[in-house]
Image (tube, grey):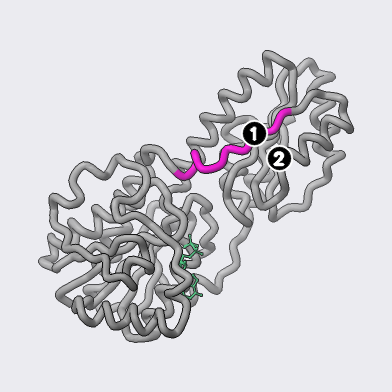
Amino acid sequence: MQTIAVLTSGGDAPGMNAAIRSVVRYGVHKELKVLGIRQGYEGLLNAEIEEMNLSSVADIIHRGGTKLRSARSERFKTPEGLRKALNVINIFNIDGLVVIGGDGSFRGAQVLSENGVPTVGLPGTIDNDLAYTEYTIGFDTAVNTALDAIGKIRDTSTSHGRANIIEVMGRDCGDLALHAGLAGGAESIIVPEIPFDVDRVCNKLLQGRNRGKLHSLIVLAEGAGNAIDLGKQIQEKTGIETRATILGHIQRGGTPTAKDRVMASQMGAKAVELLLEGKESVAVGMRGTKVISMPIKEALALENEMEKETYDLADILSK
Ligand code: ADP
C-alpha cells in the first residue's frame, strides 16, 4: 500500500473536515501518499484529484462543510461510470480509498471493492441512520443546532402562548428528532419509526395548557410528516394558535462539536490502519467510545433500530 485517496460523498455533515484531516495526517504519518478527490464519485470520474499534505488540511478541523466538497453522481452508478472510475483509480495508482458519506456512498464503496479496490467507509451523515454504528459524524452537531433553534422557539412560544412544531431532518430515521426533542424538553416527539396519533398529541398539549403551561413544543422528524400540515390539524383540533418551523439546511452546517471532531479523528485514523492491514471492504463505526469495523456488506444489511427506551423516557418526562 503506497497511495491512498479520500473523498466525501452524498449529503455533507459537520465533522467531515476533521475526518479528512485525520485520514490525511495519519496517512502521511504512515508514510503513505494521500490523494484528495474533490466532489465525491463525480470528481473521481472527472479525475479531480490532488495530492494532500500536512498543510492541505491545516485550519479545517473546526470548519463545517467539507474541504473536498461533496456531490451526488448518477453517472457513477452506470456500468460505464464504474469503468471510468476504475480507470482513473488505476491511472493514479490508488491502492486504497476512504469514502466519507452515508449509506448511498457506502453502496458505491461496496461496488468499488467488489471490483478490486480496497475501500473503507466512514459514516458521515447528520441522520445517524447507519445501523452498524451508534454514531455518525455530524449527528452531534446537528442535534445541538436543532436544540439551539428549539430553545429560541421556546422563548417566543411562551411569550405568545402558541404551539410550535419544529421539523428536523433525519430522512427515515428519528434519532435527530428524538435527541433534540428530549434535550429541548419537547411535549411531543414524532418519529417515522413509531406511528403517531394526532389526537394524542393534541390531548397532551391541552393537558399542559390546563396545568398552566405557556409554551408547547412538538418536534417532528421530516420522515414522519410535514410541519405545516400538522400545525393546521393541531390548530383546528385544539383551537390553540400553532406555528410551524422547518429547520432545513442549517442543520447540515456549522462548526462541528467536540464530540464530532474527536470521533471523526479516531475513525479517520482507523480507516488508514484498516487499509494498511489489507482490508478490502470495511465500514468503520463507534460502539460507545470504541472504534469498531465490519464488512460494508454486513453493515448495510443491518436494520436500523429505534431507541425505543429513550423515546418512552422522553414521553414520560414531557408530561
Ligand atoms: P448518502 O451517501 O448521503 O446516502 P446518496 O444516497 O445520494 O448520499 O449517495 C451518494 C452517491 O453514492 C450517489 O450519488 C452515487 O454516486 C453513489 N451511490 C449511491 N447508491 C449507489 C449504488 N447502489 N451503487 C453505486 N453507487 C451508489
The part of the chain drawn in magenta is 243-252
Viewer-nearest residue: 46 or 91: 46
Viewer-nearest residue: 246 or 195: 246
Q: Looking at numbered disc 2 in the image, what kind of residue is underneath it? A: Ala
Mark 1 packing: few (<14 Cα in 10 Å), some, or many (20+)?
some
Name the residue beneath numbered marker 2. 227
Q: Quadrant of residue 259?
A: top left
Q: Is residue 24 magenta?
A: no
Q: Report the residue that reaches farthest toward the left.
A: 31
Q: Quadrant of residue 89?
A: bottom left
Label 2 sits on a secondary structure element that is helix
Quarter placement of the C terminus: top right
In this picture, residue 162 sits left or right of residue 280: right
Label 2 near ligand 1 (CB < 8 Å): no
Asked whether residue 317 appears in the rendered view, the answer is no
The answer to the question of whether label 2 and label 1 lie on touching residues, with beta carbons closer than 8 A, is: yes
Asked whether residue 198 appears in the rendered view, the answer is yes
Up/down of 283 relative to 22, above or below:
below
Q: Residue 99 at what x, y percent from top left?
A: 35, 66
Q: Residue 144 at what x, y percent from top left?
A: 48, 36
Residue at 36% from the left image edge and 86% from the top image edge: 115
Residue at 40% from the left image edge and 68% from the top image edge: 283
Q: Quadrant of residue 112?
A: bottom left
Name the residue beneath numbered marker 1. 245
Lower sequence index among marks 2 and 1:
2
Up/down of 200 relative to 153, above or below:
below
Mark 2 packing: few (<14 Cα in 10 Å), some, or many (20+)?
many
Label 1 sits on a secondary structure element that is strand
Q: Looking at numbered disc 1 in the image, what kind of residue is underneath it? A: Thr
Up/down of 219 relative to 206, above or below:
below
- The residues tagged by marks 2 and 1 sit, at their Cα atoms, a distance apart of 7 Å
